[in-house]
Image (tube, grey):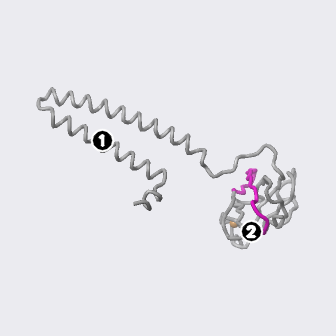
């Protein structure tokens, strides 16, 4: 039983509350129907039921809105800081990554960068990610092979990704969007010091 409680997610609680609410409404309807006999009584019951249903709907919508507002704070995305520790421009191209410190005014094709970069730990790094050809996906994996941050690299768009590397070590960059034959070898490396 205790295991069951631990396993329950927010959705699980929402489902149980909805189910309990639905059972309550059904119970009230059955009770009213059983205690009313004439046609007029039944019409009155109908009215009451519609009223309860309306209130129940209103209460549910209110709960959903409150839960939404509360749980939005729990989203695991780091908040953007106004002053990042460092800015890195990233260009994805078939089939390589080009990275260089700072923002760039070059076109993606003219931009010069390397598929390896050294960055500091415990500082907010803002990656500005774009593509020189097709859609790619800039994904950072830690040395346990866990995906820690990612964003799309899209031609003519500059997507921003902010991440704080919590520890020193080598992080691997993989492309998460199938972009052609050599997609699988589109690798990069971030040395965090
Ligand atoms: Cu790819």
Q: Are marks 1 and 2 in contact (CB under 8 Å)?
A: no
Could you say which quadrant of the image residue 149 lies in?
Answer: bottom right
Q: Which residues are magenta?
A: 151-173
Q: Is residue 127 left or right of residue 20?
A: right
Secondary structure mostly seen in magenta is strand
When asked about the image quadrant of residue 90, the answer is bottom right
Farthest residue to the front: give it. Answer: 2
Front residue (pair 191, 121): 121
Quadrant of picture, ligand 1: bottom right
Q: Position of residue 134 (x, y in %)?
A: 71, 60
Residue ID for mark 1: 24
Q: SS at mark 2?
A: strand
Depth check: 23 or 131 in front? 23
As displayed, is residue 147 above or below residue 160? Answer: below
Residue 152, percent across and down? 69, 56
Which residue does the numbered mark 2 point to in the structure image?
172
Residue 83 coordinates in the image, percent (x, y): 82, 45
Left or right of 174 on screen, residue 107: right
């Amino acid at each position: 039983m205790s295991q069951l409680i631990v396993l329950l997610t927010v959705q699980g609680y929402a489902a149980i509350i909805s189910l309990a609410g639905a059972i309550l409404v059904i119970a009230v309807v059955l009770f009213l129907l059983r205690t009313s006999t004439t046609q007029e009584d039944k019409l009155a019951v109908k009215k009451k039921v519609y009223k309860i249903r309306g209130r129940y709907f209103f209460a549910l919508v209110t709960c959903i809105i409150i839960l939404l507002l509360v749980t939005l704070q729990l989203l695991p995305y780091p908040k953007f800081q106004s002053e990042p520790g460092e800015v890195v421009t990233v260009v994805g191209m078939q089939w390589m990554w080009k990275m260089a410190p700072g923002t760039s005014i070059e076109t993606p094709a003219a931009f010069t960068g390397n598929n390896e970069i050294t960055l500091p730990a415990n500082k907010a790094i803002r990656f500005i990610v774009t593509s020189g050809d097709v859609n790619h996906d800039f994904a950072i994996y830690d040395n346990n092979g866990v995906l820690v941050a990612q964003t799309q690299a899209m031609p003519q768009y500059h997507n921003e990704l902010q991440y704080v590397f919590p520890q020193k070590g080598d992080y691997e960059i993989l492309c998460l969007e199938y972009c052609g034959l050599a997609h699988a070898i589109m690798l990069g490396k971030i040395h965090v010091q």
